[in-house]
Amino acid sequence: MLAPLSGRSVLITGASKGIGKGVANVFAEKGCKVLLAARNEALLSEAVSSIRAGGGTADYCCTDVTDAQAVQAAVDQAVQRFGGLDILCCNAGIFPNTRLKKMTAKDWDTVMDVNVKGMFHAVKSALPPLEKSDQGRIILTSSITGPITGYPGWSHYGASKAAMLGFMRTAAIELASTGITINAILPGNIATEGMTELAEEYMATMKASIPMQKLGSTDDIAYAALFLASREAGFITGQTLVVDGGQVLPESLEAMG
Ligand code: NAP
């Protein structure tokens, strides 16, 4: 069994719904003090109330990750409220679908601003308190899309998720002497609010292309994050963990068995 993470202070971006909310719930269940950051106050407040109702410690901060000052305020709030910061989950992300022919420079910038620059703001602001922790951890939510696979309409998204890994590998080296680890989870298709907004046909095709024949759950990602945050994962840095039910494995439709 892994050493307990109870009492650890955790900041999760993109935690008003989907994977981020799932990660917040699981860390709170394990006794961590969680600060949920995103833009939608009603959803954040609801998520925090539900954690508190279950006996957990949680608060929220309305944060647009593209705004460096807002991200700094979220980090400051976690430090003041919980006495420090041990774990940062950079999870906020958007995945609008636009094919190259129609894609504008603004479409490109919007995705990069949230998915890449938002991560940069969070990591940069969190470094000072993470350095003070005896178990500083940064966990990025990347994707299989970009680093491993492609999907029509997601060239900007795929580029952003691959960029997160390029950032991570150098950050891991720079941070190694501080004891802070930085790793990335690459989810396959996970059932979240963001995904169910996509066409039903997309969801059905996706299910059929996953060897385990089902979409992942937010818990599947949260438990991977728990491991990367653990004391026992302290010698793992700059690495990726694919959580996808085997989706990237088949060479062809025949290989689905
Ligand atoms: P989701 O259900 O749409 O949730 C996205 C979260 O990001 C929300 O909490 C949203 O909150 C937040 N967010 C978006 N823009 C933001 C901004 N500018 N500032 C702060 N927060 C922002 O999506 P999800 O499926 O959980 O995805 C979460 C992460 O997992 C993303 O990085 C995504 O790329 C990655 N991922 C998901 C899947 C999947 O299958 N679901 C697969 C691979 C990777 P507000 O709207 O309240 O700001």
Image (cartoon, rainbow, N blue to C red):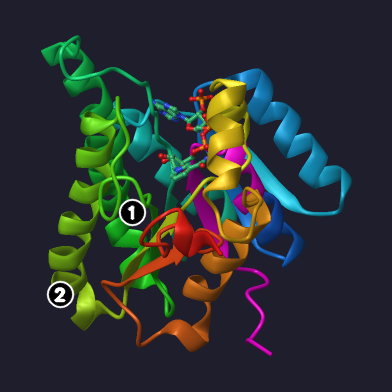
CA–CA distance in space, label 1 to label 2: 17 Å
Residue nearest the observer in this picture, 24 or 9: 24
Position of the N terminus, as image quadrant, is bottom right
Position of the C terminus, as image quadrant, is bottom right
The structure residue drawn at horizontal position 19% and vertical position 14%, both measured from the top left corner, is 103
State yes or no: residue 15 in magenta.
yes
Going from N to C along the chain, the mark reached first, 1 or 2, is 1
Q: Is residue 108 visible?
A: yes
- 238 lies above or below 145: below
Q: Is residue 42 left or right of residue 53?
A: left
The structure residue drawn at horizontal position 21% and vertical position 79%, both measured from the top left corner, is 176
Q: Is residue 98 left or right of residue 167?
A: right
Q: Secondary structure at mark 1?
A: helix
- 44 lies above or below 87: above
Q: Secondary structure at mark 2?
A: helix
- From the image, tell me which residue sits under label 1: 126
Part of the protein shown in magenta: 1-24
- 5 lies above or below 218: below
Q: Is residue 190 visible?
A: no
Q: Quadrant of residue 60?
A: top right
Residue nearest the observer in this picture, 62 or 82: 62
Circle count: 2
Find residue 51 and report its horizontal and vertical position in percent.
Answer: 78, 46
State yes or no: residue 247 in magenta.
no
Q: Quadrant of residue 154?
A: top left
Q: Amino acid at mark 1?
A: Ala
- From the image, tell me which residue sits under label 2: 173
